[in-house]
Amino acid sequence: MAIVLDAMGSDDCPQPEIEAAIYAAKNLNESIILVGHKDIIREHVSESDFAGLPIEIVHAEDILEMGEKAVKSAQLKPNNSMAVGLRLVKEGKAEAFLTAGNTGAAMFNSLRELGRIRNVARPALTALFPTAKGFSVVIDIGANSDCRPEYLLQFAVMGSIYAEAMQKISKPKVGLLNNGEEPGKGNELMRTTYPLLESSKKINFIGNVEAKEVFAGKADVVVTDGFTGNIFLKTSEATAKMLTDILKEQLMPSIASGGDNSLAKNILSAVKSKMDPNAVGAAPLLGIDGLVFVGHGRSNSTALISAIKVVREALNVDLVGTVRQSIQEELA
């Protein structure tokens, strides 16, 4: 069965989506449904580009423009590419949905078309953060600005499942992002969330973690509200870019000199492999009753190809089914 790729999602759509679809069909043996305005897609592709490939174009009349308010625009444009693509998943015509579009619009359309897993209070967006020991799952990174303690408990359960199923970490260590390690630290949300996580039998809770400890790899899963998580994400991305740019500026003269520059090349390669957002490509909206992944608006074809691979892995491990079962067990 096919994976739906939102052709109108990225900042440079639909070219990166078309290139990713062709690569996935040719090299990953994936069937892809490109959903978007067919006239715009056809401006960037010819019949010969798709010849013999398992790629289908499904028309979506409405277009969510950049700069529009996500939820209002999605409400006024019910046949946007996200909504049409998600309906294909709901109707059993596709296995999963992938977009590099607006996160708020993805959340709204996913809730409207697929709904939440039973007993999930709020779906959450997940990301992998590079650490000294590998990667940490951080949840939520922007889907829920205002949270209650019970939401964060469910985030912890879903994030733990993601780390175990996708990162192959047995009994992942779960930490609560806070401004200190002591149980009494933080605002009211963090102080009231702490005992809920501590008493849960579904997670391996290790207590509060500070931001510096996230990058040290102290926790496999880091739980926070979407407001804090989004600031943490964007600050981390900006810091990583700044450090990478500084390294390039300092090391490029050595590389350009033509001498023995193997050390400089190795350093740049190591930094790039650790910091490259294209390596993962997209993050899941955990808690939606269907597999939905959201990538960055700046996604290029490389990022979308990586995302398609991650989506397929999530399908292979039945990520949604595992989340569904674990949430029911947590509430039992």
Image (spheres, helix red, strand yellow):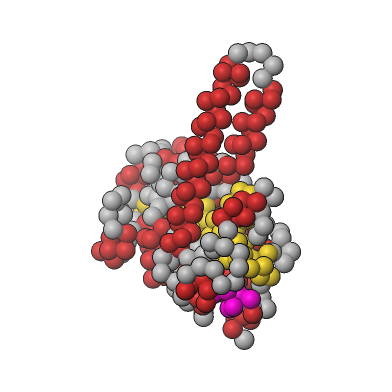
Q: Residue furthest top?
A: 258
Image coordinates for residue 100, horizontal then vertical, percent: 44, 51
44 lies left or right of 260: left
Residue at the image point whose x is 46% and y is 50% from the top: 234
Residue at the image point whose x is 51% and y is 32% from the top: 245
Does the magenta segment cover residue 194? yes
The quarter of the displayed image where residue 298 is located: top left
Does the magenta stretch mainly form a helix, a strand or a loop? Answer: helix
Q: Is residue 303 visible?
A: no
Image coordinates for residue 278, horizontal then vertical, percent: 54, 43
Q: Residue furthest bottom?
A: 332
> Compared to 16, does 134 lie above or below?
below
Say which of 173 and 32 sits in front. Answer: 173
Residue at the image point whose x is 72% and y is 67% from the top: 171
154 lies left or right of 144: right
Residue at the image point whose x is 57% and y is 63% from the top: 180
Image coordinates for residue 34, horizontal then vertical, percent: 44, 51
The quarter of the displayed image where residue 79 is located: bottom left
Q: Is residue 132 visible?
A: yes
Magenta span: 193-198
Q: Which quadrant: the N terminus?
A: bottom right
Say which of 199 and 294 sits in front. Answer: 199
Total numbered circles: 0
Say which of 129 and 208 sits in front. Answer: 208
